[in-house]
Amino acid sequence: MSDHVLVINAGSSSLKYSLVDGRSGEAAASGLVERIGESQSRHVHHGPDGDAESERAIADHEAALQAALDAFAEHGPALDGIDLTAVGHRVVHGGARFGAPTLIDDDVIAAVTDLVPLAPLHNPANLEGIEVARRLFPNLPQVAVFDTAFHQTLPEAAYTYAVPLAWRDDHGVRRYGFHGTSHAFVSQEAARLLDRAVADVNVIVLHLGNGCSAAAVRGGRSVETSMGLTPLEGLVMGTRSGDLDPAVPAYLARELGRTVDEVDRQLNKASGLKGLAGANDFREVLRLRADGDPGATLAFDVYCHRLRKYIGAYYAVLGTVDAVVFTAGVGEHSPDLRAAALTGLDRLGITLDETRNRAGATRISPDDSPVAVLVVPTNEEWQIAREALAVVGQGT
C-alpha cells in the first residue's frame, strides 16, 4: 500500500484538494475549485506539468470533486496509477467529542451534524465534501481531521468560561480553539529545527493569515489558545474583530436596532483590519500605511499590540518558552509585522536579528538568544495526510 492521501477541504462555495505523500509531505498535485454554484466557477489544477485553469459552471461539490478527478486524469498525475491509502478531510469543529483524527462512519457524520450549530458556516460544507467523497471513493477509508482536536488537551481552567452551568453543560459553551492542524504541525516542526524532542519544547505559535490565532504548546500539547467557542475570539484578523467587550453586541442591537445575527455578521465580516483600514489583505494595509494612511497605521498598531499582549500572556502560562514561531501568510511574509510584534520583549529573552528577519531566514533571532524566534511555513495538508495514515495504520 502507498503513502498517498487525497486531502479535501470543502468550503461553502469552494473545494481545495491535494494529493500528498503522507511520509515525505510532497504534494504531487493540488487544486482549487471556487465560486461553486455560480454561473462561472473557477478551477485551477497545479499538476506535474504546470497549472491548468478553466472557468465554467460547476453546480455543486459533487461536480467540483468530479472536476478535480477529471483534472488528475487529464493533467496528471493519473489517480488510477496511484494506490491511494485514504481520503483525509478537514473538518472545522469537532466539539468536545473529537480529540483525534477519526475514521468516518455514519455515527461520525451524525456527530458532526449535531455540531453544526457551533460552526454553521463550516461544518455543513465539510459534511458535503465527505458525502461526495464517500460516493466517489466507496472503497477508500475516509478520515476526519478536526481543527479543534489539537486543543482538546487544554486544561479545564483554560477552556472553561465563567458562564452559567446550563450554558456549559446543555449548550457546549466553552473554548474549543481552531487552526489546530496548523498549530500541531508548526510546533512539531519547531522542535525539529531546535533539534529537540517535541516533549521537551515549549513554544508560542502565531498563526497569522486572514484568520489569526495564537497557541501556547507545552511538550507538544496545546495548553492555551486564543480562539474560543467560535473563530471570532482572540487576535485581530482580516475581517474578524477578535477580543472585545461581550456587551458590545447587545449595546449595538439596542442602539442601532440591529438583530443579533446582523451584529454577528459585522463582527465576522466587516471588522478586524477591514473595519480599521478598509482592507482585509495585510499587504494592502502595509501599502496604505507606507503612504501615511491613518486608518492603516492604526490597524497595524492595534494588530501588533494584540499580538504582544498574547505573547506575554502565553509566556506566563508556559513559564518557560523555547521558541516563538510565526506561520501562515502574514506571519511568514511580513518582516515589518514580526519586528513590531516583538518590540519591547527583550527582557523576556525575545530578540530579533533584523538582518535575518529581513532576509527571510528560518531563525530570525540571534544564535545566543534565550528564546528562538522562528519562521516556519505551515503545511496543513501534510499534517492531515500523516494523521490520516496513522488512523488507517500506515503512520509511523
Image: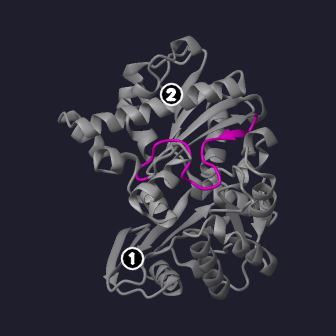
Report the front residue among 5 and 249. 249
Main SS of residues in magenta: loop
The x, y position of residue 94, in whole percent, is: 71, 62
Q: Which amino acid, by three-letter code, is at mark 2?
A: Arg
Question: Does 253 appear above or below 114?
Answer: above
Q: Is residue 394 visible?
A: no
Report the front residue among 152 and 167. 167
Q: Secondary structure at mark 1?
A: loop
Whichever of callouts 2 and 1 sits on the residue coming sooner in the sequence is 1
Q: Residues within 10 Å of mark 1 (few under 14, many from 20)?
A: many
Q: Secondary structure at mark 2?
A: helix
Instruction: Determine if the magenta segment contains residue 221.
Output: yes
Instruction: Determine if the magenta segment contains residue 48.
Output: no
Residue for point 58% across, 24% down? 312
Disc 2 versus disc 1: distance between alpha carbons? 37 Å
Q: Which residue is mark 2?
A: 308
Residue 126 as seen in the image, left or right of residue 32 = right
Residue 118 position by quadrant: bottom right
Q: Is residue 350 visible?
A: yes
Q: Which amino acid, by three-letter code, is at mark 1?
A: Arg
Residue 353 as seen in the image, left or right of residue 21 = left
Which tag is nearer the camera, tag 2 or tag 1? 2
Residue 283 position by quadrant: top left
The x, y position of residue 135, in whole percent, is: 65, 88
Residue 241 as seen in the image, left or right of residue 4 = left
Q: Which residue is mark 1?
A: 35
The residues colored magenta run 219-239
